[in-house]
Image (cartoon, rainbow, N blue to C red):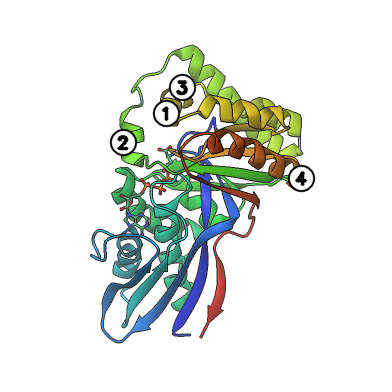
Amino acid sequence: MNQIKIFSPATVANVSCGFDVLGFCLDTIGDDMVIRKTTEKGIRISKIVGADLPFEADKNVASVSALALYNDAQPDCGFEIDIYKNIKPGSGIGSSSASASGSVFAINELLGRPYNKTQLTQFAMKGEAIASGCEHADNIAPGIFGGFTLVKSTTPLQVLQLPTPDNLYATIIHPQIEIKTSEARAILPKNIPLQNAITQWSNVGSLVHALHTNDYKLLSDSLNDVVVEPYRSQLIPHFDVVKAEAIKVGALGAGISGSGPSIFALSKSKITAEAVAEAMQNIYSKTDISFNTYVSKINTEGIRVMKNE
Ligand SMILES: Nc1ncnc2c1ncn2[C@@H]1O[C@H](COP(=O)(O)OP(=O)(O)OP(=O)(O)O)[C@@H](O)[C@H]1O
Ligand SMILES: N[C@@H](CCO)C(=O)O
């Protein structure tokens, strides 16, 4: 096999209470990437469609992560990467992560799968680090593993794949303002009150239990963030009303997707998820902020191969 085309999906990090540890994978929005072997050694970004992103190998997250794998594997060929961006950079649904994990997933396939999913996550984190300023894996892990994931630790890297309840759907609204992850991290306090920590870790524990037991009521009660959302929500116009309206029409819960500005909601059926999308759209359509909306089943497969030659 000399060439592979993949779909690298968007992902939702944090899932309200799990800052930097929880994430899940979407299905209806993602980037396409084509990666091919070259006789010339090294990693090259050959094409970028749909976004204004750097071609330099040390600046594009796709090539930075690919180089981490390449330097470890030392294959006797090189690779070039075409990126077809559908996930807008800075959207909060893992644009940088989709590129960083897509390139390592594809090269691993072309090399005959020498690395496991945890090792691929580790390489992809090197790319993610240049976009956000730190090696977090809560967007990368759900893209590579699929479904819901919990990053138990980053040193050493330990990723747990969590079960996905049947019929769980996500709604995403992306108000078109850009919030850089690095900036959204910089505004967070370095210390948190003990009572908030207690509330937060109880929510993470109960959310994980809810996923294991298909307990939608408990899932709903656990989708709360008392640590990060109070700060970041101020960067997102109309966040409080969008969240309230989503819950009013039946969402189990709603919160900031990753570092924002996208807002996610989880619902127990596609019909409710679509009603949530409409309620969210109604808020932004009364403003001059343009937006995109997505309704997606949780993608339990993660990155997928579209075509290989
Ligand atoms: N291939 C790439 N795809 C996307 N962004 C890239 C890529 N290469 C470099 N970047 C840079 O990464 C930054 C976007 O990453 P950022 O983490 O801020 O957004 P995001 O991935 O959409 O958000 P989040 O991680 O919260 O979901 C931009 O500065 C962009 O120029
Ligand atoms: N956990 C990260 C995800 C965004 O990339 C954050 O919220 O900053």
Position above or below: 177 against 128: above
Q: Is mark 2 within 8 Å of ligand 1?
A: no
Q: Secondary structure at mark 2?
A: helix
Mark pair 1, 4: CA separation = 29 Å
Mark pair 3, 2: CA separation = 15 Å
Asked whether the beta carbons under mark 2 and mark 1 sit within 8 Å of each other, the answer is no
What residue appears at the point 74 percent right and 47 percent down from the top-left corner? 270
Residue that numbered label 4 is attached to: 271
Asked whether the beta carbons under mark 4 and mark 3 sit within 8 Å of each other, the answer is no
Amino acid on which disc 3 is placed: Pro
Asked whether the beta carbons under mark 3 and mark 1 sit within 8 Å of each other, the answer is yes
What residue appears at the point 23 percent right and 61 percent down from the top-left corner? 58
Residue 266 in view, yes or no: yes
Q: Secondary structure at mark 1?
A: helix
Residue that numbered label 2 is attached to: 183
Give the image location of residue 55, x and y in percent.
26, 66
Asked whether the beta carbons under mark 1 and mark 4 sit within 8 Å of each other, the answer is no
Residue that numbered label 3 is attached to: 230
Q: Residues within 10 Å of mark 4 (few under 14, many from 20)?
A: few
Give me the disc on residue 96: none
Amino acid on which disc 2 is placed: Glu
What residue appears at the point 54 percent right and 23 percent down from the top-left corner? 200
Position above or below: 114 against 124: below
Q: Secondary structure at mark 4?
A: helix
Asked whether the beta carbons under mark 3 and mark 2 sit within 8 Å of each other, the answer is no
